[in-house]
Structures are given as C-alpha cells and as structure tokens.
Image (cartoon, helix red, strand yellow):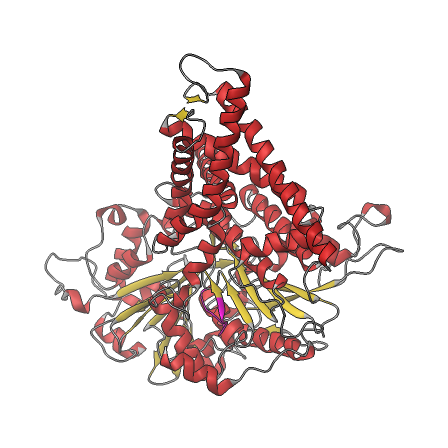
Amino acid sequence: MGGVRWRRIASQIGRSVAVWAVSTVTMLVLAAILPDFQLQSADGDSATRIAVAAACGAGAFGILSAVVWPLLVRLLLLVPALVLGLLVFFLNGSLLLLALRINPSGRGEAAPETAVIVAAVMSAVASATGAALAVRDDETYRRRLHRLATRSRRAHPPCPTAPGLLCVQLDGVGHDVLLDAVRKGLMPTVGRWLSGGDGVRPASGGERTQPADGTPRPAAGRVRPTHRLTPWRTDWSSQTGASQLGILHGSTFDVPAFRWYEKDRGEVMVCNRPTSAAELQRRAVRHTGDGGLLTVDGASRGNLFSGGAGEQALVLSIATRRRGPANRSRAGYFAYFRDPAGAVRTALSFVAEVGREIGQSTRARLRGERPRVGRGGLYPFVRAFATVVERDVVVAAVMGDMLAGRTAVYADLVAYDEVAHHSGPRSRDAEKVLQRLDRSLALLERVAEHAPRPYRIVVLSDHGQSPGETFRARYGLTLGDLVRAGCGLPVPRRAERTRSGAEARAAVRAALRRPVEEKGEHHRPSRRSEPIVLASGNLGLISFPDVPHRMTKEEIDARHPALLTTLANHPGIGFLLVRSEEHDGVVLGAYGAEIPLAELDDDPGPLARFGPGAADAVRRTHSFPHTADIMVNSAYDPADGEVLAFEEQIGSHGGLGGAQSHPFLLSPHELSAPAGGGEELTGAEHVHHVLRRWLSELDGPQVPLTEAVEEERAA
C-alpha cells in the first residue's frame, strides 16, 4: 500500500515538473515574439538568466493560479456567469502581472493588454499538457474531472452496484431533426447508439432500411443497437417551462404558455424569470404532493426547476434565494471557473462564438436570406453563453455527478434551442450546434466508464421547433396591433400603413356595420382597461386586466363587438379558444366557425389540420384557472410544417402546429419500453412517470414525499 502511495506521489511530482517545463518554454516563446513582453533587463542578459527568469515567472504564475485564483472567484460569487466569462481574461492577466512583479529573478515586465494574451496562452498550454499527461492514468483522470466539475467529493456512492440514471435534455431538438442529423452523420454518437455500429450507413443497394418509427436499423451482421428512439407529444404549451416542470415535478397543470397574465395576482408570469420559476415549482409540489424526480441523491444541472435535487448548478428556480447550503446554483458555475485553465479555455471559446455569430448573421444579411430576424445587440453574447459557458459548466458538473456516483442526474443543454430560434431549426448554424452536442454526449459516455457505478444514459428533448417567418414580417403588424385594431384602439402608424393594418380596420368597420369611421366616434378606454397581449412562440394570449374573472365570448362581444371576428378571420390565425356561457368553451375559426369543446371529436373544425391530440390539448388548457380570456394559435401549413410566430423568431415553439409538438425520448434497451404496444407518450407528465418507473427498475430510492413537500413549502 505504501509503495502505491509513493508511486502516486512521484507520478504527481513528475507531471507538475513537466507542466512547469512546458510553461517555461511557452513563456520564452511568447517573450520572443511579443514586443511588449520582456524577460530581460534593458541592457540584455545571458540565455541562462533569461531561462531562469522564465522558469521563475512560470512557477510564480502557476502557484498564483492554484492558490489565489479560487479566492478571487469566490469573492466574485455575486457576479453573473455571463460577466464572469468576460472577466476571466482580465483576472488571469492580473495574476501574470503579479507573478512578474514577485519574480525572484527581478526580471520580467509586460503591458497590461499583452499580459492578458500571455496569461491566456499559458493557461491553455498548461491545461492541455496536464490533461495529456493525466489521461494516461485513469485514476488521475477521474480525480481531475471530479475536481473541475463539482465541489462534492464523496468517496462512497450510496448504491455502488445498482446503475444510476443520467438524463440529458437537448433543449428544442425535435424527433425528426434528430433523425435527420443522424442520417447526415452530424451526430455519430447517437447514430452508433441507434444503429449498433459506427453510425447510420446505407444498407445494400445504397438505401437505408428503417422501421415505421424512423429509427435507423442496423445492417446484417452488425452489433445490435444500444438505444431505442421514441417520439412523444407535448401539451398545447409546447415550451420548456411546461415540459420540464412536468418531467421533473410531474405536473403541467395551470401552465398555459411560456408567459401569461394572472388576474388574481395582477402579475405576468414568465417561465424563465426566477421568481416565476420558483412559484411554479411550489405550485407543482402542492399539486402533486411530490417533491420531484431528483429528491433523493439527485442532481439538477442547467434546468429551470430543481426536481427536488440536493445538488444544483445553474437552476433558475433557486436563483433568487439567499446564498446558503440550500442554494448551490450560483456556486455551481464557480466550481467550474475556479480552475483558471478551464476558465480561460471557456472564455476563449466564448469570444470565438461571439465572432462566429456575428459572421454568420452578417453573411445571412448579405445573402438576403429569408426568413430572417434581427440578431444584433446583446444576442451574440447570449448565444455564446448558451452554447459555450452553459454547456461547459453543465457537462463538467454532470461528469462530477457520475464520478461521485449519484443516483439520478438531469441536465439541460440549451444551445440548439437558442440558435434555432434565430437561425432556423434546420439551418447550418443549428446543425453545427448539434455536432458539438453530440461530442458532449460522447464525452459523458466516456466518463461513465470511469464512474464507480454503471449508468443508463437517457437523452430526451422537451419540445421541437417549427419553422416559419414571423407574424409581423408576413403582415406588417404584431398580434398586439391587430388586437388594438379589433378593439377600436389606435395602432402604430407603421401598422396603419400596411395592407394588413388597413384590412384589419376595414374588418372592424364591417363587423360594426359602419362603412365610415368618424373621428371621436369611439370612446377611448382607460389604460387599465386596455388588453394585455402576450406571445409564446406562435401562441398568443389576450387578457383584460380590469375584469377579475375570465371573460366569456358573450362579454367580449358586448364590449368589443369586432374583436373576435377580426382575429378569427385573419389569415395568419388558425383558431381561437374562448369561454362560453352557453357551451362552457368554444373554438372559433374563419368564416364564422364556432365549435363547442364537447363536439371537437366529431367536428374538429379549424383544429383538423393540427393533427391528433389537438382537441384534447385545447380542452385541457381550457380547464386551467389562469387561461387567458382569448387564446390565439397562429395559422399552420401542414404542407411545409410552417407556423407564424408572434415573437421575433424564425424557429418557434409554444403552441400547436408542426414539429414543435414532437420531441423525442432516447433510452437504453436495458430499461423497459417507455410505452406499451400501440400506446403513445402524450404529455410531459407521462414522461415523468416513465422516468420514475426506470428509477424503480434500477433499484433507485423512492421519493420521500412528506419531507420533500414540507421542505418546498417552507422555501
């Protein structure tokens, strides 16, 4: 035992010396090529003295990086991750300047801007050298990954022999998009899982043979697939807030959209707002009496909701809590950034991604690509955070979870969803992101081989995305403009001058049977009585804040006689849902279509083109307490799968229509089939029960409901 320990110590010393030597050489090279970086006095020095100065400087920088850097990061705990990613360069450069100042040789100086470059290069080289040396030693490699990924260092997993469950959510990746990416060879890891070989390859005759569900079939004589691909269908609200709440907490009740107005509280709820996410999680716990999927020995990484997990990083629902043992969300990304080499690597990738987005958006504008939305302002930085910082932090945290042997891990990678919104779901930009996500899956698969327990890796999505230009680009006015016109309120001049704006005003006059609209004829309502119009992808929500209850069709017609007719007959709108005094609820469409909810199965009316399940989804949303006075779904063209987003997105989700309602569930064959023969996975709540069943099959712990509920209520 003692011999093993000494060999380990000797190995560690050898690696440290090697990294020091490489860092010294790197510093010498940089001093030779950078005019503002000197390692010698003004009168010149011998090669030996310059080498000693470089060795001392590299050693001092390495020690400061190991000792001072974690303290600096801890002091910056309140700085947002996006800002920290930019500060990394300046902090690292400051450490280099300090190292040169305390250099025992008394030599070495650099301009501040040059110090940033030197520090970044040296950190990257040291990290690469250390990783190359450590990867040959499995135990060292495990310890290195664990140290970078998480603050937890539990020596003994709770259940080392039973497999753990790792769920990786590829946000916004639809079932068909995943299959196309596999066919194109963009995702070889997923392709190998599905085909059993190196990826999807043509069978004899040059054509791929596939079963009815589209899953690639392995060629004869090849290794059997390790995973199965199962599509599932979202609720009407096809967005992360509803889907992830249902997957992690078992309830999508009363989540009608991504954002909606609650009359009883006088507040707009937004799923990606920390206060709203925390409230939704509390409601789900109360509604189900269940603490969440990850309550016992679980980890939640990069999610909107915690799932009841004790280990959390970048979890929105706890972001507003005061820092303490119960709030590790902010500390999660600092656990990653406290390693200077990893921080610099991520920061360099962040800057490169900003440049990549600027280049891609400029190219799209010069080519006149359509549809297209604005991608300026802060968007390049938001995209870089989603595709680089969030990915690196979450993947590192998941690696640490596996190496710690945690039982259940759920992580969300949002990169594709963010890019697809602005570049399109099947754009080249989005495909590049899928390639990088596949590499992350390959890395997690590799790390699982070093974990103290086996893992079943499940990959899933929360929704897809449907392509199409925006409502505003097609018609020259927003949904809010159209609503104001239908209510007889003034609309912006830009909307008045468009053809669609003129048609809307004409429709209002026709509905009111007034051929000419006289000035001053309509009473201008107060600001409080004006409607609140919100958008969630291609789903619109209209609420009248001065009416405390959900208005009926009859009340809306009495107050604004032209509004419902104007909306229902607009070519960019597919259907409306309103409450009815006579029929409880009705779906309205063009040309006077009015179908009671109870009769939708026999006569789907305007819902027919939205496919199976649309009627059930609409009926369920109608039952929610906070459903808006008027629910508006955009038009949908089944021929090309396009919808019209009420937001500025050319890849959207949030309502009904097309690929947005069809995410996927990719699961190992060691787990039971997600659904029985002929059964369809419908709704995120159904997916939650499947994951809970798999945890039970893996001998995972049962969730102690009472304790979890009480803790969530107390929070």
Which quadrant is home to the C terminus? bottom left
Q: Residue furthest top?
A: 43
State which quadrant residue 527 falls in. Answer: bottom left
Q: Residue furthest front?
A: 2
Which quadrant is home to the N terminus? bottom right
Whether 306 is among the magenta residues is yes
Residue 75 falls left or right of residue 299? left
State which quadrant residue 683 falls in. Answer: bottom right
Whole-percent x and y of residue 13? 63, 44
Whole-percent x and y of residue 667? 68, 66
Q: Residue furthest right?
A: 221
In the image, what residue occupies the spot 48% across and 49% down? 389
In the image, what residue occupies the spot 23% across and 69% down? 560
Whether 579 is among the magenta residues is no
Q: Nearer the viewer, residue 32 or 667?
A: 32
Note whether residue 604 is visible. Answer: no
Magenta segment, prevailing SS (helix, strand or loop): loop
Magenta highlight range: 304-311
Residue 406 falls left or right of residue 454? left
Q: Residue furthest bottom?
A: 706
Q: Nearer the viewer, residue 182 or 144?
A: 144
Whole-percent x and y of residue 94? 38, 37
Relative to 473, residue 399 above or below: below
Residue 557 falls left or right of residue 435? left
Relative to 67, residue 546 above or below: below
Whole-percent x and y of residue 700? 64, 78
In the image, what residue occupies the spot 48% across and 77% down? 251
Note whether residue 594 is visible. Answer: yes
